[in-house]
């Protein structure tokens, strides 16, 4: 005979996951890469993962060959535009100087014709008429030259403005390349432990990895004071999981150190993970204990 006892009926779901910081600071690549039309950047130097760094310390170096080429091309363009600017300036100065000399000469001619016309009062009417016509022609020539001088001045200003605008634009582009080039040396934005960022396929970014302008994260500085575990539960067991449930955690690295936590979120939609035949659902668990020995990526 067995006497029944009333007690707690446990439904246990066992799964594996990795620890990660609930919040972290991203160590980003060049923020101006897209503006500079640099889309792919290769990591050529990267400090070891787990290194504790101070703010401003070196973290990574990206390949500068593409941005350096753009910078040198822009430098040559600036030099050409500067030469073009000076040439346009000299041409405008010469053209306006000649126009001013011509205008002065025409005024002298006009004054000469005016004197001849005034002296022709003692001449025959035909001579007076001829003198007046020549004076009026000289006046028209002076007026036309004055108008032409104004037009040439406006043309020179317009030419200078066009060249100046092109020069300023190219200088801004060169400054952008120069600024972006300095961003290829990546320093820590704050104190913390360096943890490599992951690529789309889950692999960590290392020397030789490529980062793109849309996702320029190279590494992170996790906040180790608050950790969480991300695990994936199969569609068979997901019905047994709910937010708020208590979780017991055990580390493969330190099996003797028991941890506890609570389920903070359960994904509503399943996904296909690598090396998994069935759909799984993401479950996030907040670790209750705060321990300085806990590190991201510990299973």
Image: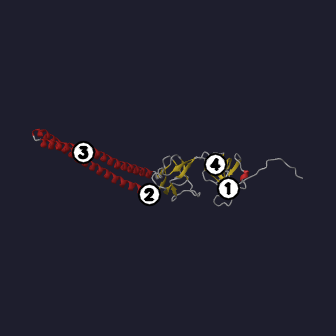
Query: How many numbered discs sit on the rendered protein?
Result: 4
- Tag 1–tag 2 contact (CB < 8 Å): no
Q: Are marks 2 and 4 in contact (CB under 8 Å)?
A: no
Q: Is 204 situated left or right of 173 in this image?
A: right
Which mark is on residue 66? 2
Which residue is under mark 4? 228
Q: Is residue 87 left or right of residue 16?
A: left
Can residue 102 be seen by looking at this rendering? yes
Choose the circle earlier in sequence order: 3 or 4: 3
Q: Quadrant of residue 104?
A: top left
Q: Which element is circle 2 on?
A: helix
> Does any portion of residue 293 appear in the rendered image?
no
Question: Which colour style is shown?
Answer: secondary structure
Question: Of marks 1 and 4, which one's residue comes earlier in the chain?
Answer: 4
| Residue 109, image x, y percentages | 17, 44
Q: Nearer the viewer, residue 212 or 97?
A: 97
Q: Residues within 10 Å of mark 2 (few under 14, many from 20)?
A: some
Q: Earlier in the sequence, mark 2 or mark 4?
A: 2
Q: Residue at x 64, y 50 (%)?
A: 229
Give the number of the disc on residue 280.
Answer: 1
């Amino acid at each position: 005979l067995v006497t029944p006892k009333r007690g707690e009926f446990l439904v246990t779901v066992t799964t594996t996951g990795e620890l990660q910081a609930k919040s972290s600071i991203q160590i980003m690549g060049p923020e101006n890469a897209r503006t500079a039309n640099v889309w792919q950047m290769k990591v050529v130097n990267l400090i070891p993962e787990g290194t504790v760094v101070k703010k401003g310390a070196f973290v990574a170096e990206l390949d500068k060959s593409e941005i350096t080429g753009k910078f040198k091309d822009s430098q040559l363009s600036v030099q050409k535009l500067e030469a073009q600017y000076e040439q346009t300036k000299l041409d405008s100065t010469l053209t306006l100087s000649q126009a001013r000399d011509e205008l002065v000469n025409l005024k002298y001619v006009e004054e000469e014709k005016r004197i001849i016309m005034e002296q022709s009062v003692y001449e025959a009417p035909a001579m007076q008429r001829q003198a007046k016509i020549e004076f009026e022609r000289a006046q028209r020539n002076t007026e036309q030259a004055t108008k032409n001088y104004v037009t040439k001045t406006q043309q020179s200003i317009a030419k200078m403005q066009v060249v100046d605008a092109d020069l300023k634009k190219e200088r801004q582009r060169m400054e952008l390349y120069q600024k972006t080039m300095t961003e290829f040396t990546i320093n820590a934005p704050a104190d913390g432990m360096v943890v490599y960022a992951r690529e789309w396929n889950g692999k960590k970014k290392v020397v030789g990895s490529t980062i793109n302008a849309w996702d320029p994260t190279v590494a992170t500085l996790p906040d180790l004071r608050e950790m969480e575990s991300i695990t994936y539960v199969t569609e068979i067991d997901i019905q047994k999981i709910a937010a708020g449930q208590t979780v017991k955690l055990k580390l493969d690295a330190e099996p003797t150190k028991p941890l506890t936590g609570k389920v903070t979120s359960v994904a509503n939609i399943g996904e296909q993970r690598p090396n998994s035949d069935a759909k799984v659902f993401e479950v996030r668990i907040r670790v209750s204990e705060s321990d300085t020995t806990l590190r991201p990526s510990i299973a």
